[in-house]
Image (cartoon, grey):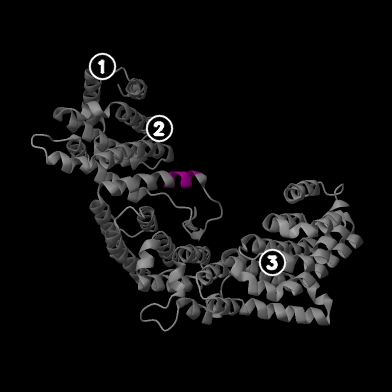
Amino acid sequence: MAAYRNLTLQCLTEVAALQFGDFYNVQYVKMYTFFMLQLQAILPPGTIPNAYANGSNEEQAFIQNLALFFTAFFKNHIRILEASAENRAALLVGLEYLIGISYVDDTEVFKVCLDYWNVFVLELFEAHNQMEPAIPAAQMIPGVDGTGTAVHQRRQLYASPLSKLRMLMICRMAKPEEVLIVEDENGNIVRETMKDNDVLVQYKIMRETLIYLSHLDHEDTEQQMLKKLTKQLNGEDWSWNNLNTLCWAIGSISGSMVEEQENRFLVMVIRDLLNLCEITKGKDNKAVIASNIMYVVGQYPRFLRAHWKFLKTVVNKLFEFMHEMHPGVQDMACDTFLKIVQKCKRKFVTQQVGENEPFVSELLTNLATTILDLEPHQIHTFYESVGHMIQAESDNTKRDEYLKRLMSLPNQKWAEIIGQAGQSIDILKNQDVIRSVLNILQTNTSVATSLGPHFFPQISLIFLDMLTVYRMYSELVSSTIAEGGPYASKSSFVKLLRSIKRETLKLIETFVDKAEDLPHLGKQFVPPMMDPILGDYARNVPDARESEVLSLFATIINKYKAEMLDDVPRIFEAVFQCTLEVGITTLFLLFILSYTSRFH
């Protein structure tokens, strides 16, 4: 009776989840085969997604319970179904049902299925990985099949379900973290505003599962992906979702193929995607294709390192996307550029065959045009990327020249502001100027992050002016708080002023932290900082003190240890009087003591 189906199925699921040993194997086989006969009469295997979409609550619950039954039974008893030829047909039908259930448009149902598929494929992959070497060895001994033969037979048994499972993973692949462009509830392509942790967890499981599936049959994986991509190109299967899941799947299996196969595969994929971007009309369509190109190329650095022309084409395409005003495209272009440069940086400073100069030089020549349409935070990411390129240059003269060219634009603006401030300090109160100064400092911090000790020529150039600006803004903060009272420290204007101080401290700390093999740095940089930074910290009202000062000097002492011993008394003098007013200083003093005690 239909009324009792769900209760009966729940009961059978409880039984399926139990293990009583070999004694009850026959009963489990009978239960499963009889169940399959009844199920096929009620619900044909090829109709499940439609049956769920159009079904009543009871009918949907039945399909949900089916997922639980099959996953429970297969987890505990799949081996007894594999054991005899007469039961294998029923086993394969059951797997067909579970694949059909996996296409149901319900997150919880899919999670149940996915968890099982991950376990199922992992077990097959591990068995294949362990036993594959045994097959040739066994074949050398007459009359001995070897354990590897049994593994091979299992792979043959599951060849069809595994192929369908690959297509399932391709069609339902979850969105990776790197993809910033999504479709909203109104069907518009927008920039993602919040990460969905459930989706990220699901992506990791699906990625792992598809990698195992790829290892079990590289050819089938490649053929299914390329066939689906061809359908995108000819419009037969075109949709945002279909292209997205396909490209996320392609990106997810990076490293699972041997290099030669991966190279051949990627050449076809990237060419088809670039072609699709050219022939497709519409801003939203192009934004979707762009996001997929960027995701795929970012996942295959090995391929890009081996193919300069493709690498250059991809990077130039990213530069094109940096002028695309569609929400999310520029962010993703900058993020992908950074990711690629980190993995391929040597390629950009080496003059490639057929090129007149290293790519980094060409990039620096066109820098102003490339970053013209980027927002400040995107420019910072871009500058960090170029810093990684320059860091890979081993010739000191070339490296310093590249750095000079990279910092030319912010340095021109910096010199202009310093010159105007020399004529009238009031210019520093202008909020546009404050934001410009902040942007310049953040750009420098980004380059210092990636360039490390080789940032020394640039920070030496701006260091003293930077301390002067720090002092000016500190005095401005103090006077504003003194005039406006305690509440003035919470005003947006004071917060903006203090952001200059904090970014200055962050820039110096970043450089000091990254600067290896520069033992003279402490002696060169610390004395000029004593009054503008430490003295300022001591003089300021509590609401105007920056805790980042303590972090900076803790980093300096940690980095240079014995070289800083002579300066420790002056540091104590600057912060000790503030101990009762700023509790965090106590921790700082303990930190200093822990290091100075090692050298007495």
* Label 1 secondary element: helix
- Quadrant hosting residue 87: top left
Query: Is residue 397 depicted above or below 70 in this figure?
Result: below
**Which residues are drawn in magenta?**
198-203
Furthest residue toward top: 23
User: Is residue 427 left or right of 482 when viewed as pictured?
Assistant: left
* Residue to which mark 2 is pinned: 57
> Residue 366: x and y, percent?
52, 81
74 horizontally vs 362: left or right: left
Q: Which mark is residue 397?
A: none
Residue 201 belongs to the span the image colors magenta = yes
Q: What element carries label 2?
A: helix
Look at the picture and state if 578 lies above or below 340.
above
- The residues tagged by marks 1 and 2 sit, at their Cα atoms, a distance apart of 35 Å
Q: Is mark 3 on a helix, strand or loop?
A: helix
Tell me the residue that label 1 is attached to. Answer: 24
Residue annotated with mark 3: 521
Q: Where is residue 115 in the image (x, y as percent from the top left)?
A: 38, 37
Residue at 88% x, 57% y is: 541
Residue 365, position as x, y percentages in the image: 52, 82
Mark before the other along the chain sequence, 1 or 2: 1
Which three-letter amino acid code belongs to the residue tagged 2?
A: Asn
Nearer the camera: disc 1 or disc 2: 1
Q: Is the magenta stretch mostly helix, strand or loop?
A: helix
Quarter of the image containing the N terminus? top left
Q: Front-most of 509 and 88?
A: 509
Q: Does the magenta stretch include residue 62?
A: no
Mark 1 and mark 3: Cα distance apart in space: 76 Å
Of label 1 and label 3, which has the lower sequence position? 1
